Image: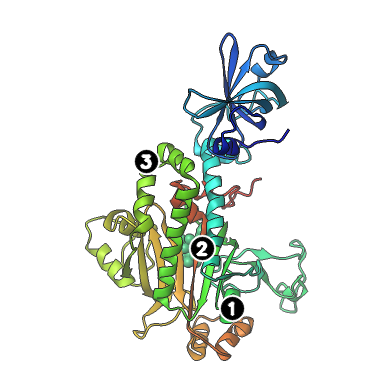
């Protein structure tokens, strides 16, 4: 007999039909003559209620099974008087596996920290089921959004020799024996003996290679894993995270800022359409204001200010910050959160940052002090998008690279994009987990990725 998912059952309500459902026991409640079994199969937020009569031959066995046990249950779909429109009247209950006495998810109200330690089991909870179904739909929304706009999906390399962000937050990729590396005459490690013949790293961005494709196919995006060895133990940094990076030929900073806002709003609307039950659940148990926040952000235009204006707002407000606000310094999380959570009470686009705190490839403004950069900040999270118009002028780009002491031959191919048919172009990176945090209301980035990698943590 065909297995039905619980999602399919609720969608089609095949009253009178005999079906099989397979899933994990959420709870069972015994009466004298039957059991109420509550089953979830992960297909949706919804549980199925099943009536299992005491006459069933293995009633004693399955009645003893604990929360988390796996069952295949055959039965007839009947209309229900309960909360759900239908329930199942069981004719057969097959036990796949009971749980051991030490099953860690039996107790209610386990902490997020504890659930991180059992990240292999936490997807079975209602909260993580909701988060990861939403994460799936946001990934689908991403591909749909860009595809509908005529962008091409490009897979850029994960192993690279370039530190494109210049932040030195690289993970080395090497096959040399760390105990006995080959040395050159000066006694330094001889990287020419390494696998790639030079030093190699995991990528911190796919942007530079993305630019090669944008200056050929016009509009492209990447969606892949990104690695940064930054030693920031914060609720919004991971060592391994996923990034979406559109790169658009002939686009300027305003175009790309608009694209970023449209993309965030598209994801929000997509989640509201595809995951109403998940959002309802998270709104009840994780973040009470979630639904109203998403509804208000979905359609309203984003506020837009320059970095210089942001600094003025921060310097003139009454709030005491831990980090001093000074023109020229990067905005700290507390500053970003003040702008989004308190001053604007919504997302805000900040443009034209000081050039000295930004990457080499950003287009320089006429003022000689700022670059055509933009960050999109959202309440509860802070920065979710970082982007810029790119420097398309060969001389200016080389000058900046020299100033920053970059190895020019590594980037020679990148300079070709300016030597041959250069065009104005712009792009941004959106941290996928930051977007999932924002749209699910989860407050720690470790809880929106299946298995998190952070300093001193590479479990599972
Ligand atoms: P932050 O100031 O928050 O460290 P950043 O300026 O280093 O961010 P960018 O280099 O602009 O970030 O990267 C683009 C986007 O990637 C960011 O807006 C953010 O959403 C995401 N991102 C950056 N670093 C991380 C990280 N360590 N973990 C998760 N997401 C990240
Ligand atoms: Mn960073």
Q: Which mark is residue 288?
A: 3
In this rendering, does residue 367 appear at all?
A: yes
Q: Residue furthest front?
A: 16
Q: Which residue is drawn at the image coordinates 36% and 49% (left, top)? A: 293
- Local secondary structure at mark 3: loop
Instruction: Tell me the crowding category of disc 2: few under 14, some 14 to 19, or many 20 or more residues within 10 angstroms, Cα based.
Output: some
Q: Residue furthest top?
A: 32
- Asked if labels 1 and 3 touch by Cβ distance under 8 angstroms, the answer is no
Q: Which residue is drawn at the image coordinates 67% and 11% (left, top)? A: 55
Residue at mark 2: C-beta within 8 A of ligand 1: no
- Asked if labels 3 and 2 touch by Cβ distance under 8 angstroms, the answer is no
Residue closest to the eye, 368 or 403: 368
Give how far apart the Cα atoms at labels 2 and 3 are.
28 Å
Q: Is residue 31 above or below residue 18?
A: above
Q: Which residue is mark 1?
A: 217
- Local secondary structure at mark 2: helix
Quadrant including the N terminus: top right
Residue at mark 3: C-beta within 8 A of ligand 1: no
Instruction: Tell me the crowding category of disc 3: few under 14, some 14 to 19, or many 20 or more residues within 10 angstroms, Cα based.
Output: some
Q: Which residue is mark 2?
A: 145
Q: Position of residue 296 (x, y in %)?
A: 34, 53
Residue closest to the eye, 441 or 205: 441
Q: Is residue 358 above or below residue 287?
A: below
Q: Which residue is drawn at the image coordinates 60% and 41% (left, top)? A: 119
- Asked if labels 1 and 2 touch by Cβ distance under 8 angstroms, the answer is no
Give how far apart the Cα atoms at labels 2 and 1 are.
17 Å
Q: Colour scheme of this structure image?
A: rainbow
């Amino acid at each position: 007999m065909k297995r039905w998912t619980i999602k399919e059952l609720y969608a089609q309500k095949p009253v009178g039909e005999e079906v099989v459902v397979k899933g994990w026991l959420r709870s069972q409640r015994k009466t004298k003559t039957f059991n109420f079994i509550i089953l979830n199969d992960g297909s949706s937020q919804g549980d199925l209620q099943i009536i299992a009569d005491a006459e069933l031959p293995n009633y004693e066995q399955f009645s003893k099974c604990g929360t988390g046990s796996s069952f295949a249950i055959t039965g007839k779909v009947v209309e229900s008087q309960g909360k759900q429109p239908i329930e199942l009247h069981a004719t057969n209950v097959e036990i796949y596996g009971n749980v051991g006495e030490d099953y860690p998810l039996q107790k209610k109200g386990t902490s997020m920290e504890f659930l991180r330690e059992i990240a292999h089991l936490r997807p079975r909870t209602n909260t993580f089921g909701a988060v990861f179904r939403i994460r799936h739909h946001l990934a689908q929304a991403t591909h749909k959004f860009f595809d509908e706009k005529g962008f091409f999906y490009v897979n850029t390399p994960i192993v690279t020799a370039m530190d494109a962000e210049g932040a030195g937050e690289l993970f080395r990729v090497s096959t040399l024996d760390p105990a006995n590396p080959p040395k050159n005459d000066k006694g330094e490690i001889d990287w020419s003996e390494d696998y790639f013949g030079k030093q190699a790293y995991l990528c911190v961005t796919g942007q530079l290679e993305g630019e090669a494709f944008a200056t050929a196919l016009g509009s492209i995006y990447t969606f892949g894993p990104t690695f940064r060895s930054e030693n920031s133990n914060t609720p919004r940094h991971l060592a391994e995270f996923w990034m979406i990076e559109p790169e658009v030929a002939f686009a300027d900073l305003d175009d790309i800022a608009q694209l970023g806002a449209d993309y965030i709003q598209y994801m929000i609307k997509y989640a509201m359409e595809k995951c109403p039950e998940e959002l309802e659940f998270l709104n009840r148990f994780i973040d009470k204001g979630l639904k109203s926040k998403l509804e208000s952000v979905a359609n309203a235009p984003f506020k837009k200010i320059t970095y210089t204006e942001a600094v003025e707002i921060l310097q003139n407000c009454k709030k005491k910050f831990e980090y001093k606000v000074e023109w020229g310094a990067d905005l700290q999380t507390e500053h970003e959160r003040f702008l989004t959570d308190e001053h604007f009470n919504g997302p805000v686009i900040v443009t034209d940052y000081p050039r000295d705190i930004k990457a080499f490839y950003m287009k320089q403004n006429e003022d000689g002090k700022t670059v055509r950069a933009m960050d999109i900040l959202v309440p509860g999270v802070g920065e979710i998008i970082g982007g810029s118009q790119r420097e398309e002028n060969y001389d200016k780009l080389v000058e900046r690279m020299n100033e920053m002491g970059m190895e020019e031959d590594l980037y020679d191919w990148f300079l070709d994009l300016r030597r041959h048919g250069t065009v104005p172009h712009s792009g941004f990176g959106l941290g996928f987990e930051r977007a999932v945090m924002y749209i699910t209301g989860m407050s720690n980035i470790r809880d929106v990725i299946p298995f998190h990698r952070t300093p001193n943590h590479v479990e599972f």
